[in-house]
Image (cartoon, grey):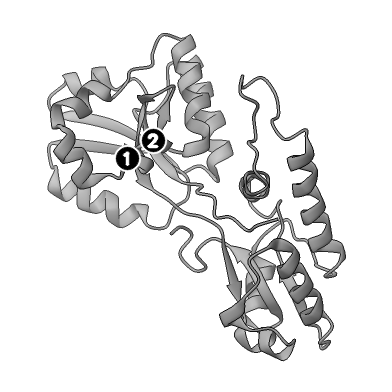
């Protein structure tokens, strides 16, 4: 199975902001997950736009918790004006808004800016990540993806070569197994599909196997097939063949990697939280 980079990113989702923009001065409630880089961005925005008051809500622990809070807010008319959501949750949130008659496409707003402005500021592929049924319901804000970090010394000690690194999961697993045999408490790889708050890493495995999380009708899972079995097989092999320890939290693996006790670790940008 080929290794594949899968974007798991964030977008600005607007939830019923018409009334907020009608007032002068403008006051907006803003909701996001715990992202370290948000504080300086908010500070800069407030300095550049003194006429706009941003009421920042207490950050959500993760995207899943944030989504649930926003949906509950829609039901009680207490949803934030602006929500920083994951790209994967935008279709669900827009679906709820459509059912409530509150979804508004941003296409007219982008149309006023013109194609030159769009191409100068956004790649079309990035804009597409925040579209639902061909319409722009959110604006791209940031993007991150899982990375395989490698301890060069341990890879070479196990007979590997970082300049000719495996490009399949089977090759990575074989190399990780060799690293695990070095002894002295060294592990070959750390990769827990449950290491984050949601199924982001599992999405990577399923999509890397050539399938999607949901079926075309969005009525059920889309990986109850050979591609899903392939993703499960690779995940199982990674744990069993390498003797990998599986943690519910990514911090132990990060600490062991920095201590030189793990040959490879799958993580987002270590030390910053997002790419």
Give residue 107's quadrant in the image: top left
**Left or right of 32 in this view: 2:** right
Kind of element beneath mark 1: helix
**Total of numbered circles in the picture?**
2
Q: Is residue 41 above or below residue 255?
A: above
Q: Secondary structure at mark 2?
A: helix
Depth order, front residue of 204/185: 204
Mark 2 Cα shell of 10 Å, populated few (<14), some (14-19), many (≥20): some
Give above or below for 118 relative to 1: above
Q: Which mark is residue 201?
A: none
Which residue is tagged 2? 128
Q: Quadrant of the C terminus?
A: bottom left
Residue 111 position (above or below residue 160): above
Q: Position of residue 116 (x, y in %)?
A: 15, 39
Question: Which residue is disc 1 drawn over?
Answer: 124
Answer with left or right where residue 230 lies relative to residue 46. right
Residue 198 in view (yes/no): no
Structural crowding at the residue carrying mark 1, measured as other residues with C-alpha within 10 Å and reported as few (<14), some (14–19) or many (≥20): few
In the rendered view, does 192 fall on the left or right side of 241?
Answer: left
Quadrant including the N terminus: bottom right
Query: Which of the 4 image quadrants contains residue 13?
Result: top left
Q: Is residue 170 visible?
A: yes
Q: Are marks 2 and 1 in contact (CB under 8 Å)?
A: yes
Residue 171 % position (x, y): 73, 69
Q: Position of residue 207 (x, y in %)?
A: 62, 44
Q: Is residue 214 above or below residue 184?
A: above
**Could you tell whether 211 is left or right of 131 in the image?**
right
């Amino acid at each position: 199975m080929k290794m594949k980079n899968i974007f798991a990113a964030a977008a600005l989702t607007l939830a019923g902001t018409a009334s907020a923009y009608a007032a002068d001065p403008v006051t907006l409630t803003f909701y996001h997950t715990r992202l370290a880089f948000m504080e300086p961005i908010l500070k800069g925005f407030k300095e550049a736009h003194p006429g706009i008051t941003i009421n920042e809500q207490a950050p959500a622990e993760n995207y899943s918790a944030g989504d649930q809070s926003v949906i509950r807010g829609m039901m009680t008319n207490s949803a934030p004006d602006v929500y920083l959501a994951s790209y994967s949750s935008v279709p669900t949130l827009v679906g709820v808004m459509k059912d409530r008659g509150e979804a508004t496409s941003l296409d007219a707003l982008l149309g006023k800016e013109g194609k030159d402005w769009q191409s100068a500021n956004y790649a079309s592929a990035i804009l597409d990540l925040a579209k639902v049924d061909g319409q722009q319901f959110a604006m791209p804000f940031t993007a991150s993806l899982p990375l395989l970090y490698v301890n060069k010394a341990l890879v070479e000690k196990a007979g590997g070569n970082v300049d000719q690194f495996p490009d399949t999961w089977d090759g990575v697993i074989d190399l990780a197994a060799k690293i695990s045999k070095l002894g002295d408490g060294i592990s070959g790889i750390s990769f827990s599909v449950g290491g984050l708050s949601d199924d982001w890493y599992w999405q990577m495995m399923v999509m890397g196997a050539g399938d999607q999380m949901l079926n075309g009708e969005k009525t059920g899972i889309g990986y109850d097939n050979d591609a899903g079995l392939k993703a499960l097989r690779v995940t199982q092999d990674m744990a069993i063949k390498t003797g990998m320890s599986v943690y519910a939290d990514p911090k132990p693996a990060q600490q062991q990697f920095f201590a030189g006790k793990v040959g490879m670790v799958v993580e987002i940008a270590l030390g910053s939280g997002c790419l």
